[in-house]
Amino acid sequence: MPKQKKSFFQRLTGAVDIDDGYDDAYEEEAPARHTPDTRGRGGSATDLRDGREEWLEEEAAEGQLTVDVYQTPDEIVIRSIVAGVRPDDLDISISRDMVTIRGSREEHKEVAEDNYFHKELYWGSFSRTVLLPAEVEVEEASAQEKHGLLTIRLPKIDKEKQTKLKVKTG
């Protein structure tokens, strides 16, 4: 049976797909798991932990805004939850085929860190770039925020639109 490439999850966790012949995969990989040089960055478990910390720090640098993107016959609409962000703190850049939304959500420290039971809300800067499925009229775009929901409306370019030009004599 040809070997299939492992998924990201399988490589990350060491999981094995049972349907792909668990015994064969375990036998082939068992010796490699015990040799220190085959670990993630070629070092000890401490090195692996450090690698994860670096990865988490990169992720924490800037959050990624979640969006819904859909189209109607005349426009492309992007919606996103931006609760806790003042409209003045949002920066929306639009080109004919791409939209970038940037902003920052500031946390007001009212409680000491060690008094939290859960801390899941995202605080800090965020951004999201959306590649558009059709070209849009940049000058006619509009954005509105209501109850924490940002709605960006982008009118599509009408490629079927035709105009008649009159030739001037001169």
Image (cartoon, rainbow, N blue to C red):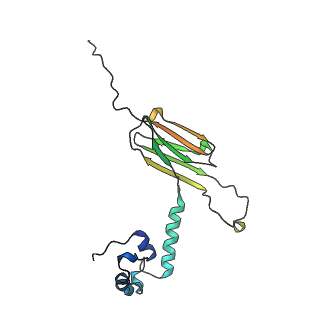
Residue at 40%, 39% (x, y): give it. Answer: 96
Residue 168 located left or right of residue 79: left
How many marks can you see?
Answer: 0
Q: Position of residue 18 (x, y in %)?
A: 40, 77
Q: Position of residue 86 (x, y in %)?
A: 63, 44
35 is higher (above) or lower (below) than 78: below
Q: Residue furthest top?
A: 170
Q: Quadrant of the C terminus?
A: top left
Residue at 69%, 55% (x, y): give it. Answer: 108
66 is higher (above) or lower (below) than 135: below
Residue 40 located left or right of residue 119: left
150 is higher (above) or lower (below) than 4: above
Q: Nearer the viewer, residue 150 or 72?
A: 72
Residue 60 located left or right of residue 111: left
Residue at 47%, 46% (x, y): give it. Answer: 69
Residue at 35%, 76% (x, y): give it. Answer: 20
119 is higher (above) or lower (below) than 88: below
Q: Quadrant of the N terminus?
A: bottom left
Q: Position of residue 123 (x, y in %)?
A: 61, 56
Q: Position of residue 120 (x, y in %)?
A: 62, 61
Q: Nearer the viewer, residue 54 or 26?
A: 26
Q: Nearer the viewer, residue 113 or 155?
A: 155
Q: Residue furthest front?
A: 19
